[in-house]
Amino acid sequence: MAAPMSWRRLVLSVYSPAMAGAFARVSDRLFRVRDRRRGSSVLLLAPLLAETDTAPRRVSRPSGSAGAQGTDGLCAHFGWMAEQAPAFRVPGTHIQILTSPDQFYQAMKAHIKTAQKRVVMASLYLGTGRMEQELVDCIEEALERSKENAHAPGLKVSILLDYTRGSRGQINSRTMLLPLLQRFTSQMRVSLYHTPDLRGLLRLLVPERFNETIGVQHIKVYLFDDSVIISGANLSDSYFTNRQDRYVLLENCSEVADFFSDLVEAVGDVSLQLRPDDSVTTLEGLVHPYKAGNRQAFSAAARKRIMAVVNAARVRQQLLQSEDSGGSGDVSEGEEDTWVFPLVQMKPLGIQLDEQVTQRLLMSASSDSAVFLTSGYFNLTRTYMRLVLGAGANYRILTASPEVNGFFGAKGVAGAIPAAYTHIARQFYQQVCRLGQHERVHLHEYRRPQWTFHAKGLWYYLQGQHQPCLTLIGSPNFGYRSVHRDLEAQIAIVTENEELQRRLQEEQEMLYRRSTEVSSSTFKQSDRHVKLWVKLVTPLIKNFF
């Protein structure tokens, strides 16, 4: 990265001048001997240097040429991300873009079968059908092999789900996993995150079907040894068959895998732990999310635990980059041509890194750049909408048509959700036209018979580029819930690898090819009529769905 933070500046920013001076004298000797990936002595101090409870960083407009090209240009344009999130450098050839639900499902099963040390899975919930059971069976077989294999006896499985969604109904995510937990108690961990916002009278009054609207664990990370899939897809049969999402597989990227393993472990530590008898408990000494103590105490403890992981990784990567910039040049620039920035958003816990980075990215999108943005639920926050309408970049926004909305045909109030999103889209389109932005901001609707649409993220093009150099991919939807209510995580991938850029371009084209552009006539169609009561409850839907 351009102008990485030096270790001296880092120490001065954390410690007093006297302590920093002492540290500098000692570490001058340590820096003379480098062993880059095994880590120098100073890297052992990264957790101590990391601020475990840093204040949110101010979002400001970055400098740099929008038309920058090549390694130096991309670093100058996006290097500010390393100030806010861990920055991992990986070979672009290690990143695969999966394009279908079946690829996603088969990749998970294949990696579970070959896992030797860890399987870590974070999702909203685990479904209860045949395909989900096959996935559980794969985990069971891997654990059995681990017991029998003297070379890999230590396979550990950790699964993080949302408490409310994972406990719904008599047959649920918990009952799917209990047999594994009972049989492999020492190798298996199931954590159920419970939002601190669902407590007291509210917890008693909100029906089971709607209690997840208050806030959920929404991170989608699937990790197998040193490989990890980042996605927006849940562990449910529709996401394995006919629900279109996005998925990226990072193969043999140990540092990225370690980070997400630590992140899931941290969230798991502040979650409820599932026991073999189907009861739940907290880890010893930790605040209960909705019973003992108060909301602030839980949020503060959870924030401290999670940010310790984020900040330790950020500091460690900054130290590694500082060493590389003054080292002997033993790193092949042509191989590690891609940066991965994990972005975490947990507003109920006071963590908003993804929001800050996304805002700055949209803010920096100048008139000679282009952004393709997609969300299964078109519900941009006011801030994101203001940045899209106020920036100079060309935008093409892809969302679900009513027929491929996941709530289409649902019973009760949920059945009105597609119409509410139609109303939101109409309001946005009218505002675009009113501001004279219709030549710059285009809205598209995904259409595919017998399928639903759940893809989210963006592709970013600098001036003169016909392939994206940056993508955001993960669980956030760019809406109110993603920013304010749920636990989210995605990654920003910045790459100069032309083959990876080509695959990202093909992914974008594949999704947009199945769309039609919205025009004023779209909302005049008879099936786009929105009832008055739906319009009246749309503000409520925007905040909770």
Image (spheres, rainbow, N blue to C red):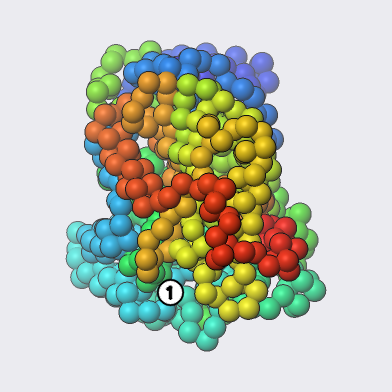
Q: Quadrant of residue 129?
A: bottom left
Tell me what residue is drawn at x 33 percent, y 39 percent: 504
Q: Which of the 4 image quadrants contains residue 529?
A: bottom right
Q: Residue at 55% x, 66% y: name it.
A: 527
Q: Which residue is mark 1?
A: 127
Q: Is residue 24 above or below residue 419?
A: above
How many numbered markers are drawn? Answer: 1
Q: Residue furthest right?
A: 201
Q: Going by the image, does 11 lie left or right of 447?
A: right
Whether residue 327 sits left or right of residue 535 in the image: it is left
Residue 127 position in % (x across, y down): 43, 74
Q: Is residue 419 left or right of residue 475?
A: right
SS type, badge 1:
loop
Q: Which residue is more in the foreground, 404 or 118?
A: 404
Q: Quadrant of the C terminus?
A: bottom right
Q: Nearer the viewer, residue 323 or 362?
A: 362
Q: Quadrant of residue 212?
A: bottom right
- Residue at the spot 43% in from the left edge and 17% down from the top edge: 67
Q: Is residue 251 above or below residue 178?
A: above
